[in-house]
Amino acid sequence: MSENNPSKIVYTASVTSSGGRKAGRAVSSDGVLDVSMTAPKETGGPGTGTNPEQLFAAGYATCFTGALGLAGKEQDVDTSAAEVRADIGFGPEGESYAITAELTVRIPGVDQATAQRVVERTHELCPYSKAIRGNVPVTLVAVAG
């Protein structure tokens, strides 16, 4: 498997976690991110804080939205009003757990074929998609608007 190595690192996010997913805390080096981490009720936790899957979903949806702009520009499609919802599934796999991803992308003002084409190209460009390709099952749902 090939790696997607950037030619230059322009930013590094640094987050320190303590306490794990049951009763933890995650804090970024700049202090902007400071969240309590708890397991969701569905996995036996209190569900009173955020969890790694929510944070991953937020990052993936945001990153995909940014890459959508690149794909749209390539194909002369206005994606400025687009919305991306990331649903990250979490469940047992072998001796541990694994995740799945489903991205629902709504692009107003385009037909279904155009939406599908732009979403598929975005999946090729998005750094999160590249990072998990071949390791996490991803379902893409394009929605014309």
Image (cartoon, rainbow, N blue to C red):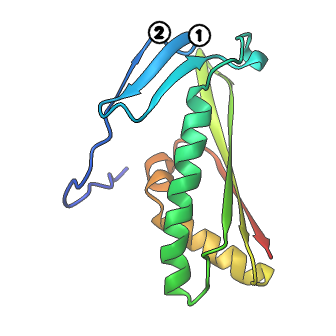
> Are the residues at dot 1 and dot 2 in contact (C-beta closer than 8 Å)?
yes
Are there few (<14), some (14-19), or many (20+) residues within 10 Å of tag 2? Answer: few
Percent position of residue 9, x then y: 21, 53
Where 132 sits versus 32, above or below? below
Q: Position of residue 70 (x, y in %)?
A: 48, 75
Q: Secondary structure at mark 1?
A: loop
Q: Quadrant of residue 28?
A: top left
Residues 42 and 28: in front is 28
Percent of width and height locating residue 95: 59, 14
Image quarter of the C terminus: bottom right
- Residue type (three-letter) at the residue carrying disc 1: Lys
State the CA–CA distance, disc 1 to disc 2. 7 Å
Q: Which residue lies under the disc numbered 2?
A: 19
Residue located 75% across and 77% down the image: 108
SS type, badge 2: loop
Local packing at callout 1 (Cα closer than 10 Å; few below 14, some 14-19, many 20+) is some
Q: Residue at x 61, y 22 (%)?
A: 97
Q: Which residue is mark 1?
A: 22
62, above or below 113, in the image = above
